[in-house]
Amino acid sequence: MRQAAAAVFGRPAFWWVLAALFGARALLLGGLLGDHRDGRSFWVAGHRLVTGQTAGFYDLVAAAEARGRLPLPEEGLLGPAPQAFLAAPFGLLPETWGVYLWIALDAACLAVAAWLLIRRLPPLPRAVAAAAGALFTPVWAELAAGQRGGAIVLLSVGAMAVVAARPLLAGTLAGGAASLKYYPLAMALGRPRAAFVSALAATFAAVTVAAFIPLGGVLDYLRRVLLPALAPNDPDCAIVSTRGLWMRWVGGSSWEWLPPGGPQFLRSPVQLPGVATAGYLATDLALVAATVWAARRSGWHPAYGLALGLGLGALLPGEVYPYQVLPLLPLLLLVVGLAVRAGTAAPLVALAPALLLLLRPPCDLPVPNLWTAGALGIFGIGVWQHRLFTAERAGGEGRAL
């Protein structure tokens, strides 16, 4: 029996079938059947841009935030101006076609990024990593929302692939990713080299400022849109941030649960908001310190350090929705692929419960922030396994890429 199981699990074809099944599930439930709320807001922003409707570009979004609610898709874009330029070609199409093409391109970007990370691994590690990536539920959440994480991940993985040999190009790619969403700036923690960091910062600043010029300027966006959006909406059960974990379990904040009978609001019996605030701030500092420590212990392995820094984007913000756990995907793929290649079972066994915590949508269960625990688990296992990347670097810098 044991030999038969080993024969099945030792075949790359078995894992590729799993990857295909999980990938098809994400495409069906997310890409085709999701509500695509965010995808529609991107289409609206792109359409307004290509039709010259740039006056008061963020007015409706700012007004919605002032009333304490999320903007409706037809009110436009909550994100920074480079996202509107990314969406502009899709705004030339009818809305339905534009949104579905946007989602298809997002899925293609994720597939290409995953392939870039695992393509040089041997057949079995490559197949197991592909299955783990397809199982990673934030991929489904990304497609269901119609977000733009695929472009961010692809640019970031491109930086990982070339940073050892071409740090200026890598910094340019990372800076482009950061202009779409600010969290890729944290990749500088995993690769604190002057050429990479300077190119990242310069590209981020140049793209951001240039994109905002026709839309009212960076300062106007910061004041009217970004800063109000940073105020967390604690009762929202879809928020899976580290801050939410502490505030709900320890700080006494309520959270929403959506059972079949209708919404309910729950609260922990522990109500120590001061302790919760200190706890999540200390957690954030520990995550940053762990990133630098693990990257340094790996000998500043190029892909690993950048993957750790990118992964912070799923853990540090005050508000994290399910699709925003996606930045952990490159770290997950690298750890799984190298662990299988090294014949090390411990990280794979440890990753299983972390991935299981992400299987159900966060509003389905009365227990809050299970996704947060899963995300912290994946990141913690990635830090713990820095030795995999020390050995990888000894065999040639960035050899897995």
Image (tube, rainbow, N blue to C red):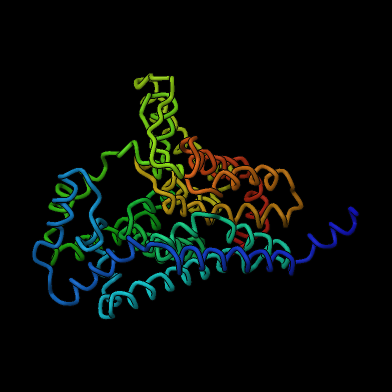
* x and y percentages locating residue 266 in the rendered image: 41, 30
Left or right relative to 18: residue 343: right
Left or right relative to 299: residue 67: left
Whether residue 151 is visible to the viewer of this picture, yes or no, is: yes
Task: Work out whether 251 lies above or below 340.
Answer: above
* x and y percentages locating residue 281 in the rendered image: 38, 30
- Which residue appears at 51% of the width and 44% of the height? 375
Quadrant including the N terminus: bottom right
**Number of marks in picture:** 0
Task: Name the quadrant containing residue 56.
Answer: bottom left
- Which residue appears at 44% of the width and 47% of the height? 314
Quadrant including the C terminus: bottom right
Task: Name the quadrant containing residue 79.
Answer: bottom left
Residue most extreme to the bottom:
93
Q: Nearer the viewer, residue 159 or 326?
A: 326
Left or right relative to 87: residue 314: right
Task: Work out whether 360 lies above or below 98.
Answer: above
Q: Nearer the viewer, residue 236 or 170?
A: 236
Q: Nearer the viewer, residue 185 or 370?
A: 370
- Which residue appears at 20% of the width and 43% of the height? 68
* x and y percentages locating residue 59 in the rendered image: 12, 57
Task: Name the quadrant containing residue 16.
Answer: bottom right
Left or right relative to 61: residue 330: right
Residue most extreme to the front:
261
Whether residue 167 is visible to the viewer of this picture, yes or no, is: no
